Amino acid sequence: MLDRFVQTATQLDAALAEVAALGHNLHQIQARMRELGSPVPNGAQLDSLGYRCLLTACASTPWHRHFQVLAPSERRSFGAPIDIWRVTNEKHLALRLGDQTIIEAA
């Protein structure tokens, strides 16, 4: 059991480091998208979503009592907002490039 405990804690450390790295990457990519004219998300939208996603995930851990409790309507994952932002950006890009087929398909 001790070996499993150590292994699991090590895996958790690696997963948390990956969350941090991916969060930084997401912010860098969003900033570059804005530079290129992307209408969504802006920095505040990504900050708000990321915060709610992390709190939602933390709420399902044994340490949930140490984190702010979100109302059910505030709990989030990246999935749905990212899909909406993708569609919005595809339409925006199609307009900028003059490609009506992308707009009609969406």
Image (cartoon, grey):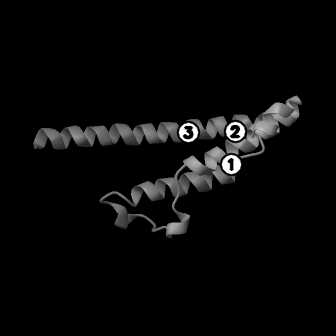
CA distance for labels 3 and 1: 12 Å
- Please state if 37 lies on the left or on the right of 77 as rendered: right
Q: If you read the primary sequence from the N terminus, does the residue marked by circle 3 or circle 1 appear first?
A: 3
Within the image, what quadrant is residue 5 found in? top left
Q: Amino acid at mark 1?
A: Gly
Image position, residue 20 (x, y; %): 47, 41
At horizontal 62% and vertical 45% (from top left) the residue drawn is: 82
Image position, residue 26 (x, y; %): 59, 39
CA distance for labels 1 and 2: 7 Å
Say whether marks 3 and 2 touch (CB < 8 Å).
no
Above or below for 50 versus 6: below
Look at mark 3 in the image and give the residue it sits on: 24
Say whether marks 1 and 2 touch (CB < 8 Å).
yes
Look at mark 1 in the image and give the residue it sits on: 43
Residue at disc 2, secondary structure: helix
Q: Amino acid at mark 3?
A: His
Please state, as top left, top right, bottom left or bottom right, where the C terminus lies in the image: top right
What's the mark number on residue 31? 2
Foreground residue, 102 or 93?
A: 102
